[in-house]
Image: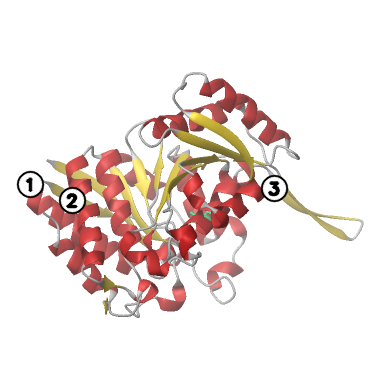
Amino acid sequence: MDFNLAVIKGDGIGPEIVDEAIKVLDAAAAVYGHKFNYTRVLMGGESIDACGVPLTDEAIETCRRSDAVLMGSIGGNTATSPWYKLEPSLRPEAGLLKLRKSLGLFANLRPAYLYDDLAQACPLKKEIADKGIDLIIVRELTGGLYFGARSTVEQNGVLKATDTLTYNENEIRRIAVKGFDIAMKRRRKLTCVDKANVLDSSRLWRKVVQEVAKDYPEVEYSFMLVDNCAMQLVRDPSQFDVVLTENMFGDILSDEASEITGSLGMLSSASLCETSFGLYEPSHGSAPDIAGTGKANPIATILSAAMLLRYSLNLGKEADAVENAVREVLREGYRTADIMSDGCTQLTCSQMGDAVAKAIR
Ligand code: IPM
Ligand code: MG
């Protein structure tokens, strides 16, 4: 079949990791008889440089008309890049937030999985790592602190900044339903993470999640405070299956969850709306310090492309083929710099893409 994909390469290592994901998608297309048509879309710093804004309306429309969006990463060094001298609404990250909001991508899925072959890269004690890590963070993506009213004002010579955390019950319900649906396809265990001992918004989350849970009697669910969750993730991550949480907590916990699996460079993500359309990007950032050095790990982006095949194009077999190819390459001892260990063979970003593409069956 023919599919139309919008492609955002972005900044830093974005272009190099996306090129490798495209290599792998094309290899899967060749084996399974599909054709992917790619349309480049600018976002983030590359769009600021070319168009003066981090995301144009035309870019949003190109994404909307596609079957799915494949993305690398956006943003630069916040201390040195001229992009961060611009007002906040014109900086690279504002483009990504606008795209998520405009396309209604309220459900962000971030799986964290410890590969047997990467157990050495896991920073946790061996007895903890041996229990395995296989969890998915279901992060609300278009509400909360990220999208509440904010301001900075001066009152009587004193600067005051405000950010607001707002959720309505409908926003909570739709992400809770996604979380429970996903739990039904996994180990049927869901942990809702919040700060209900302090925040009203968290107390509303608990109320709505309890209501939604009634429709999923097979799912064992519980609530956990976010500070405790941050601790439990390093104490015993094997206790988690689905972690359901609001936008900001999900941002923080997903970096932690990916780090305990050995490298941020391995973790994929999918941002979904009510339809099959979605945006797929690695969980990590644009790592401007290693851009162009060949040190970037393209696996998170390749695995995001696998999620794209599965969730947006309904190509489950092809998605399995990509994931199996990654597993095979790791088993053979090939590594990028971030996950390198004794006795393995170190590859550049582009060589890793070649290896995975070649392993597609
Ligand atoms: C992420 C990133 C973004 C976020 C930034 C770049 C705005 O950290 O996707 O986790 O906070 O959502
Ligand atoms: Mg983040």
Residue 53 visible? The answer is no
Mark sitting earlier along the chain (1/2): 1
Badge 3, how many Cα within 10 Å: few under 14, some, many 20+?
few
Residue shown at the point (33%, 80%) measured from the top left? 342
Density class for disc 2 (Cα within 10 Å; few <14, some 14-19, many ≥20) is some
**Disc assigned to residue 321:** 2
The kind of secondary structure element at disc 3 is strand
Residue for badge 1: 33
Q: Is mark 1 within 8 Å of ligand 1?
A: no
Residue identifier under label 3: 150
Q: Amino acid at mark 1?
A: Gly
Give the SS element for disc 1.
Answer: loop
Determine the secondary structure under disc 2. Answer: helix
Q: Are marks 1 and 3 in contact (CB under 8 Å)?
A: no
Picture quarter with the C terminus: bottom left
Tag 1: Cα neighbours inside 10 Å, few (<14), some, or many (≥20)? few
The picture quadrant where one finds residue 122 is bottom left
Q: Nearer the viewer, mark 1 or mark 3?
A: 1
Residue 24: give x, y in percent of width and height. Answer: 20, 59
Q: CA distance from mark 2 to mark 3?
A: 45 Å
Instruction: Please provide percent x and percent y for residue 211.
Output: 57, 20
In terms of depth relative to the viewer, which is nearer, 110 or 40? 110
Q: Is residue 331 visible?
A: yes
- Nearest to N terminus: mark 2 or mark 3: 3
- The answer to whether marks 2 and 3 mark residues whose Cβ atoms lie closer than 8 Å is no
